[in-house]
Amino acid sequence: MTNAEKLTELAKRRGFFFGSSEAYGGVAGFYTFGPEGAALKRNVESSWREQFTTRLGNEEIEAPTIMPEPVFEASGHLDGFDDMLVECAECGESHRADHLIEDNTDIEEAESLPIAEVEELIAEHELECPNCGAPLAGQDVVDFNLMFETSIGPGNGHPGYLRPETAQGIFVEFPRLKEYARNQLPFGITQVGRAYRNEISPRKGIVRTREFTQAELEQFIDPESDEPPLEDVRDVEVVLYPATEQEKESVEYIETTIGDAVDDGIIASDWVAYFLGVAQGWYESVGVDMDRFRFRQHLPGERAHYASDCWDAESELGGDWVEIAGFAYRGDYDLSKHEEYGDDSFTVFQQYDDPKTVERAVVDPDMSALGPEFGGQAMAVAEALQDLADRNPDAFDSDEVTVEVDGDEVTVDTDLANFSVEEQTESGEHITPHVVEPSFGVDRTVYTVIAHAYAKDEVADEARSFLQLDPTIAPTSVGVFPLLSNAEELTEQAHDIVDALRDVGLSVAYDESGNIGRRYRRQDEVGTPFCVTVDYEGLEGDGPDTVTLRERDSTAQLRLPVDVLVEELVAVRSGAKPFDALREDYEAVDSDDA
């Protein structure tokens, strides 16, 4: 059994995640997070919020997951949010063509290749249908849009789509969000929520699904003046895999610091570099193995339609590198598109420190003449004349000027335009902010954390598998056991301890089933960092009542007084006090049931 298979079996058996609707045969690409998985996922999300919302001084919103069609017309998702599909002529099964190439050849990033080249590679490598084994050579590879379509309202209603990313919910609300930010750049808006993509071939458990959770930050900046606090992350060490290195035959990583990567031009955007540095620290804090982690730059052919540059955070899972976050410089693409399609302003008025006197080309068209000549188009003609004056004032030097209105060219006598150049005093200007976006896949991060935490060892000559989860994100903080389930004095004390621990916000599992060693193993498998056992030895002495406290990774056990247990557990769980410090203060317990 491979590690991936062992993790899948563990996830299902211990309640981390499992296929949804299995009573009805299940549907590929949809998963349910069980009690342990949902708790772990919530803790990862809370940790992300603390870092990217609270510590960075940003605000969070929650937008609908269904949005009307015009939103996605403006964003470009209706035309450009596609994957490459190839259909088997024998069994009719659809497959993602670039994944077939990556799985069966040495080519790593087939997504960046044009369709014609993908078709050639399928034929060259004689790739077959994974479902029935029929050859796929000669089958057309086509673009398949990943959007889930729905209808809003009764009857035919209005066409809408389930959002493929949480970002658009932030962008469409920008006109109101900028007011909350008092029109002061830079500012950031975060959102954690569900997104939907109609994947051609979901695979690898919760790594590629049709419904998933994203955690995204949209940082709105003035590209001319706003700089990130790069000094905060300048010395953060990172492993980079830039596009230039990916074009070479052998894999060569660049091990450097964020500061040096910017100084050397490896990362072009200071803002992207800053968020890479912040993300590196956050991933390490939640338990991602930094020896199995890298930042890879997108090749030109695989960048999203909105991104001028993009880097992925990738984790190694079962020998494959999997994207778990993307960091894109989106420029002004999104806000400019919504300005063009929407009915509101997606710009910010930036006040000058001191008013400026500037020369402006203006037109004051004679509407009494334009009205009879152009009828209902007269106002559009006037607006087109002003646009032309802004772009090319020299065009008004001739006797006539030509402008475009509704796709048609219209010629106007220059005298009717009343063109002039005037001095005007301006207190500021409207700018379209640029956007820098760190976008995190929560489900993939959860899977990475589980996979990287999975460990094996031997305890008392017995094989043990366990999850070395960081105590701050482990789904259960403490396991509490009475040594014997039929001893009332032990169970009463255990229940009192459970109540006290829950009162301070710790997640507690109470277990009195089976021998104590088996109870430890159950908690080890779900990553519970500490276990408390109530036994007769702790209740029968002359001094205060005591219990044993067991640490998961070392299996070391200490005897602690009950009256300090809660305080000490809160300290070690939060990281304020290392477990080794407890060893100096309390008696060690030797036990064969570790």
Image (cartoon, grey):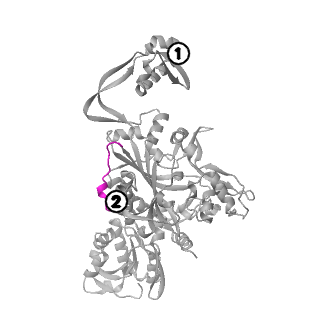
Q: Per the image, is 227 magenta?
A: yes
Asked if residue 439 shows in the view, the reply is yes
At label 1, the amino acid type is: Phe
Callout 1 secondary element: helix
Front residue of this view, candidates 350 and 4: 350
Q: Relative to residue 272, is residue 31 drawn left or right?
A: right
At label 2, the amino acid type is: Asp
Kindly indicate the quadrant of the structure image that contains residue 52: bottom left
Front residue of this view, candidates 41 and 510: 41
Q: Relative to residue 202, is residue 412 drawn left or right?
A: left
Q: Does residue 385 sit above or below 205 in this rendering?
A: above
Reading the image, the residue beneath label 1 is 374
Report x, y in % for residue 59: 36, 48
Q: Given the current orientation, which residue lies at the most extreme right position?
A: 90
- The tally of labels here is 2
Q: Does residue 501 sit above or below 303 in this rendering?
A: below
Report x, y in % for residue 532: 37, 77
Callout 2 secondary element: helix
Kindly indicate the quadrant of the structure image that contains residue 354: top left
Residue range of the region highlighted in magenta in the rendering: 222-235
Report x, y in % for residue 350: 32, 36
Q: Relative to residue 430, is residue 586 drawn left or right?
A: left
The disc placed on residue 288 is none
Report x, y in % for residue 512: 44, 78
Disc 2 crowd, CA 10 A, few/some/many (<14, 14-19, 20+): some
Front residue of this view, candidates 278 and 528: 278
Q: Earlier in the sequence, mark 2 or mark 1?
A: 2
Asked if residue 440 shows in the view, the reply is no
Q: Quadrant of the N terminus?
A: bottom right
Q: Does residue 248 sit above or below 509 in this rendering?
A: above
Q: Residue at x 44, y 88 (%)?
A: 460
Reading the image, the residue beneath label 2 is 260
